[in-house]
Image (cartoon, grey):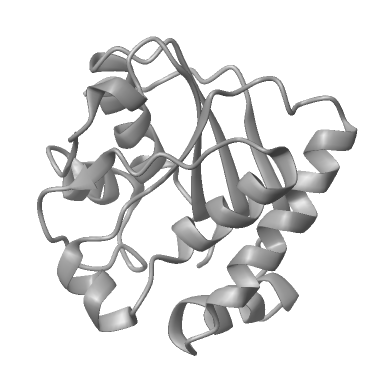
Amino acid sequence: MGLTKPNLAMSFLRFSKKGASQSLLHQLKYKNKPEIGIELGRLYGNILRQSGFSQNWDHIVPVPLHPLKKKKRGYNQSEQFAKGLSEALNIPVALSLIRVQFTETQTRKSRMERIENVAEVFDVDSLDEIKGKRLLLVDDVMTTGATLITCANVLLEKGSKAVDLAVIAAGKNQ
């Protein structure tokens, strides 16, 4: 699997261990606070809109959770972020990227282990929403970029015109 080259890779916050960004993400992911993702998406979406980015994408695509993990958590935190971005940017969310394999958490893995852990994990179930489209792929946090690279490559291989990346927070979590 090769690396991908998005036109844009953006982060709303810088991830800092034991900082405000980690606290927000922890609340969003583990404390049943999906509204945090929506609000962060709205805030970031307003910044992107005011900066002239609202015409850059046809759809916003959240990184999917495996159905078992989504059922356990009750929601996908990346999808919540996408909903807030969608409201602010007036761009629809496309749930066409799917996770076809369950993977263990990546929090304690090296970059190479993360890339290997997510290879062959994602697919597209609706080509209509992505073929020839400019997509904004979103996730909650980016550390090594392994998940986003894998997802972007799948979307491009399936016919997307372009894939840009946006996350709530980026930086090392270890």
Residue 31 at x, y percent in the picture: 49, 90
- Residue that appears at 37% across and 67% down: 107
- Residue that appears at 35% across and 47% down: 111
Residue 20 at x, y percent in the picture: 74, 77
Left or right: 136, with 50 as reference point: left
Quadrant of the frame with the N terminus: top left
- Residue that appears at 17% across and 39% down: 119
Foreground residue among 87 and 3: 87
Query: Is residue 3 at least partly visible in the picture?
Result: yes
Asked if 25 appears above or below 78 in the picture, the reply is below
Q: How many marks?
A: 0
The single residue placed furthest to the right in the displayed view is 50
Asked if 125 appears above or below 98 in the picture, the reply is above
Foreground residue among 14 and 50: 50
Left or right: 72, with 95 as reference point: left
Foreground residue among 28 and 149: 28
Left or right: 84, with 157 as reference point: right
Choose top left, top right, bottom left or bottom right for residue 133.
Answer: top left
Foreground residue among 150 and 143: 150
- Residue that appears at 59% across and 23% down: 57
The single residue placed furthest to the bottom in the displayed view is 31
Residue 36 at x, y percent in the picture: 64, 74
Residue 100 at x, y percent in the picture: 11, 48
Asked if 17 appears above or below 62 in the picture, the reply is below
Query: Is residue 171 at least partly visible in the picture?
Result: no
